Structure formats: structure tokens, C-alpha cells
Amino acid sequence: MGTLVDIITEGPDPALLASATQAAYAEMTRLSDLMNHYNPESVVSAINGAAGIRPVAVPHELMQVLTRARMMSERTDGAFDITIGSLQGWRFSPEQGQMPDATAIAALLPLVNYRDVVLDETKGTAFLRRKGMRIDLGGIAKLYILGAGIHVLKRNRVTHAMINGGGDVEVIGTIRGRPWRIGIRDPLHPERLYAAVEMRRGFVVSSGDYERRFERGGRRYHHILDPKTGYPTLGPRAVTLISEDMDLINGLSSSIMVMGMARGREIIERNPAMEGIIFDRDGSAWVSPVLERRLIRPAQDAAP
């Protein structure tokens, strides 16, 4: 999906680790090639090209991602919506940022509706009901692809590993006999860590307004768009979620940036299998109670 991926493994057999790592990279590349809408040869590009015309046959891995996307859209009342890809014209490079004008956004916004993604799981097809619709799986495919990489490692008898794809992480086992330590960035100072958390298994997923962005007229425009307005979200600055259940959090961090602090807190607090941090616009952070006890702050880390 255009994301740099790092794999770290540990074990007694370097040849096995090297072979398993190569196999994991190969599988993640294969899945990315299927799901990347920037790749004109991808199945996602085929779905977009056939919008309003005909259904497209999809492999089972892509169908799994599409069904998970639909479930997340239903859970969040449309705050998560893969048809946000219909909003063409945004470019979030700091040097060459572009935004469509209000007329263009208003014209494209009716194409944003996850209910118009028709999935036939029996026939294995996907269909976009309206011409001009496009899907973008960037908000949900990445964690699925990392999970597939870990699955390949496990299948090759690797029991200690971390895969990091642009800040989204899955870990299994330990590193040098200790839990993996995963850093959580400070959205006000992205070059710094706000804190870290130790894990032996599970996923960490983050969304924020500090990466793909540009500034214009004193306002920051970032890549997480609100499906109801067509413009970047105005709620929290960043969200980090942690769980052993990928489906519980995959796509949810960006959804909370759309829904806002209050709704995000409610979702996290009522799910004991999930922990999280929500950074508000002023940089203050709400941390779920269990995670608060687990966080390792930079000052703690430096203490003798």
C-alpha cells in the first residue's frame, strides 16, 4: 500500500528466520498489489474502473477486507467509509498540497456511501453501484496485510517477531527475553515519543493529522477525510488503539478522528479487549485506565 514495512525476528536458526522473512515479505507484497488503488493493475483498480457498469470477481483475501470494511462502517455509522476514495483532487504532500474547490467536493460527495458497495460473497464479486465511485482501502488493508505477514512467519515456525508498517504494528513473542516495546508518537512533536507500551502479542494501530498533510491559510489539511463533509476531520489530532483482536480496531482509529473525543472514549471504555489514547486538538491526551497503568513515559524510561 505504499508503506515501508520492517520485520524483526528472533530465534536460534538464522537461515530459517531469513527464509521465513522473505516469504512474509512476498505474501505482503502480493496482497498489497491486489488492494492498492494506485496500482492500475490491482483488483481494486478494476473495481473502480467498473463502477456503475458491472461486478468484478475478487479473490477471497480482498473479499475478507471488503466485508470487514463494511462491518466497520456499520459499527461507526459511516464514519469509516472506503468510498471516500471517490473524493478525487486532494493531494497531501507538504510541498505540493492540493485541495479541490467547494463545488467539486459538493459534486463528488454523493458518491461517498459505503451502502453502494455491493458484495456477493457467494459469487465472489464486488460492485460499485454508481459511476464515478472509487474505493480506497488504505484505512483497513494495511493491518490485514501485516497480519498475513505474521501468519506466514508462524507457519514457518517463527515464534518471536514484530512487523511494523508505517507505525501500525503486530507482535508475537519476545525480543531478547523481554516483551516488545512499541513507541507511541506525540502528535504535537511527531519526532518524539509520547510513551511506549510493552506487548507479547497483539496489534497497535494509529491515525493522526501529523503525517500526510499540508498547510494553507493557517489551517492544517490532513489525509483523514470526514465522509459527511469531504474535508479533513476537525476532531482529535491522533488516536492509538491496542488489542489482540485485529478486527476490533482495524479502521477504528481513523473513525474516532471523524466521530470525536466523546464517542471515541465511549467505544474504548465499553470494550475491555481494547485500550487506547486519544489526543485532543490542544495536545492533551485521554488514556484508557488499563493502558494508563501500562504506559512507559520517556521520563520513566530514563530513570535509573
Image (tube, rainbow, N blue to C red):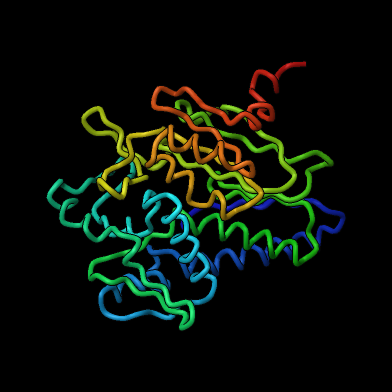
Q: Please determine whether, in this image, residue 50 is positioned above or below residue 160.
A: below
Pick whichever, 137 or 286, lies toward us. 286
At a point 35% along the width and 45% down the height, the residue shown is 223
Quarter of the image holding residue 114?
bottom left
- In this view, the residue farthest toward the front is 270
In the image, is 9 to the left or to the right of 58? right
Q: Please determine whether, in this image, residue 64 is positioned above or below residue 222.
A: below
Q: Please determine whether, in this image, residue 88 is positioned above or below residue 286.
A: below
At a point 40% along the width and 22% down the height, the residue shown is 282
Residue 54 screen position, x and y as percent: 31, 81
In the image, is 284 to the left or to the right of 7? left
Quarter of the image holding residue 109?
bottom left
In the image, is 221 to the left or to the right of 33? left
- In this view, the residue farthest toward the right is 12
Residue 147 screen position, x and y as percent: 62, 58
- In this view, the residue farthest toward the top is 304
Pick whichever, 3 or 145, lies toward us. 145
Q: Where, quadrant-wise, is the C terminus in this rendering?
A: top right
Residue 98 screen position, x and y as percent: 24, 45
Residue 53 screen position, x and y as percent: 26, 79
At a point 56% along the width and 59% down the height, the residue shown is 144
At a point 35% along the width and 68% down the height, the residue shown is 117
Pick whichever, 85 or 161, lies toward us. 85
In the image, is 95 to the left or to the right of 125? left
